[in-house]
Image (tube, coloured by chain):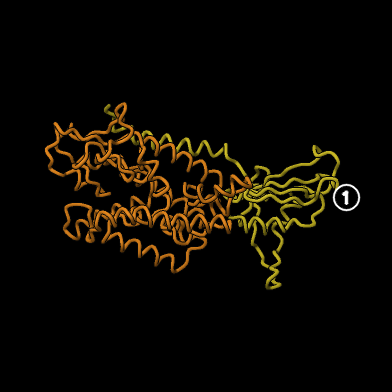
């Protein structure tokens, strides 16, 4: 499954690079923006109030955003772990950083206290989302474009990409060395939109206490640094169902993908999930 | 209840396919421009007499560039309405075929663009590459 996921990620990146270069060379009129589901949310206000799209956003963005919500309801943030090209690049960077700094897990060089980590994951991403949506809905322009790592990476120096855009991208990559997947965890506006949906996602990783030896291999393998060995079911809104944990688990039946048990939709008070 | 691991990539592929297919259901223009109110002088009484041409225009990338391309048709006899689909560089122009045709539309769109702020004319800003499903480059190559 690890190889299949890598194949998915490489295929998406190859497709994004091809789309970006073809558009830049004038061989295609479909830019990489067309395939960004966040564009669907950015243009939602204009689409639903005036039946018109903002800037270069179009129906593909809206349809992909709706499809993404449907996927997230069932498979959590599988999009982030299997499709998002920025997520893939940052995950590879995190793996590289882990080797460079001799770490065994994805905790990173800087370990934020749990409270600060949670506050940033929600608060900072919400703030980024609010600013982007307010500016986009007010101006009708995709104002985020110049700051968007996806657009900067794959548009082949597209419209609105300036020198400072590369500085932003460099900052994101540098931050990712110290705080793995910092963009995804603390800044990605799409991530915070998906988070509540993902928390309610049907598929989850279930840990069998009978088979689990408590070795912690799953915790160390998780790119999101989720404390998998502490919980009976991984219901975190950040789980991307990348299945790195199940691949790392030495006991085949200890950690498995599962549907919710009947009556377990909500965690009991105080339960760790 | 256990779920097979292959379900995750299957769901990813299904949702992507659903999204691409669903794009056909959410079609809406980036820009709509009316050139003459119904009943205005020159407007045909019968809307059925109007014709719509679909032009793919290199240079139309967003609402702003579509708006500028739409202004190129200002004052052109017979042109009634324009719908721009910026994400696909597509303009759908409705016009009175007794007063205009697709070639006239192409000529007007490709004409130098007057930049009001500087008073300059910008050449080659727009290039019509497809008209009513026919790729211009191919058609012109065949003629040669």
Q: Is residue A271 visible?
A: yes
Circle 1 residue: B41
Q: Residues within 10 Å of mark 1 (few under 14, many from 20)?
A: few
Q: Quadrant of residue A267?
A: top left
Q: How many marks?
A: 1
Q: Secondary structure beneath disc 1? A: loop
Q: Is residue B114 left or right of residue A73?
A: right
Q: Is residue B53 left or right of residue A258?
A: right
**Above or below: residue A175 compared with residue A71:** below
| Residue closest to the eye, B137 or A95 | A95
| x and y, in percent, of residue A111 in the image | 23, 58
| Residue closest to the eye, B142 or A2 | A2
| Residue closest to the eye, A137 or A220 | A137
Q: Quadrant of the N terminus of chain B?
A: top left
| x and y, in percent, of residue A168 in the image | 40, 64
> Which residue extends farthest bottom?
B118
Q: Is residue B141 visible?
A: no
> Which residue extends farthest front?
A269
> Which residue extends farthest right?
B41
Q: Report the residue at 28% width, 33% height from top.
A: B5
Q: Colour of chain B?
A: yellow
Q: Report the residue at 44% width, 51% height from top.
A: A18
| x and y, in percent, of residue A74 in the image | 38, 35
Q: Quadrant of residue B75?
A: bottom right
Q: Quadrant of residue B115?
A: bottom right
Q: Colour of chain A?
A: orange
């Amino acid at each position: 499954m690890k190889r299949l996921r890598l194949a998915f990620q490489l295929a998406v990146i190859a497709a994004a690079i091809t789309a970006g270069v073809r558009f830049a060379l004038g061989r295609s009129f479909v830019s990489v923006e067309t395939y960004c589901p966040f564009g669907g949310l950015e243009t939602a206000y204009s689409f639903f109030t005036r039946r018109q799209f903002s800037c270069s956003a179009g129906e593909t963005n809206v349809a992909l955003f709706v499809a993404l919500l449907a996927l997230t309801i069932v498979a959590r943030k599988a999009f982030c772990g299997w499709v998002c090209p920025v997520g893939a690049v940052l995950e590879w960077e995190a793996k590289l950083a882990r080797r460079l700094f001799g770490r065994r897990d994805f905790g990173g060089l800087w370990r934020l206290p749990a409270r600060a980590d949670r506050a940033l994951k929600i608060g900072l991403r919400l703030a980024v989302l609010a600013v982007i949506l307010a500016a986009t809905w007010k101006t009708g322009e995709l104002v985020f474009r110049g700051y968007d790592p996806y657009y900067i990476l794959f548009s082949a120096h597209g419209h609105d990409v300036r020198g400072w855009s590369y500085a932003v991208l460099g900052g994101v990559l540098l931050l990712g060395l110290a705080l793995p997947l910092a963009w995804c965890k603390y800044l990605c506006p799409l991530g915070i939109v998906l988070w509540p949906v993902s928390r309610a996602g049907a598929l989850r990783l279930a840990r069998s206490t009978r088979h689990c030896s408590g070795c912690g291999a799953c915790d160390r393998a998780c790119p999101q640094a989720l404390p998998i060995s502490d919980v009976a079911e991984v219901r975190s809104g950040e789980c991307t169902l990348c299945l790195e944990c199940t691949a790392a688990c030495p006991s085949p039946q200890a950690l498995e993908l599962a549907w919710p048990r009947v009556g377990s939709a909500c965690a009991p008070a105080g339960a760790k999930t | 209840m256990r779920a097979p691991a292959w379900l995750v990539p299957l769901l990813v592929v299904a949702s992507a396919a659903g999204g691409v297919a669903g794009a056909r259901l959410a079609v809406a223009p980036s820009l709509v421009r009316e050139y003459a109110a119904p009943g205005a002088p020159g407007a045909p009484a019968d809307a059925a007499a109007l014709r719509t041409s679909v032009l793919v225009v290199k240079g139309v990338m967003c609402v702003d560039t579509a708006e500028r391309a739409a202004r190129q048709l200002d004052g052109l006899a017979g042109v009634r309405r324009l719908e721009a689909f910026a994400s696909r560089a597509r303009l759908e122009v409705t016009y009175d075929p007794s007063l205009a045709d697709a070639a006239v539309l192409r000529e007007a769109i490709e004409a130098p663009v007057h930049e009001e702020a500087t008073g300059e004319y910008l050449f080659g800003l727009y290039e019509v590459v497809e008209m009513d499903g026919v790729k211009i480059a191919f058609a012109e190559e065949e003629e040669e």
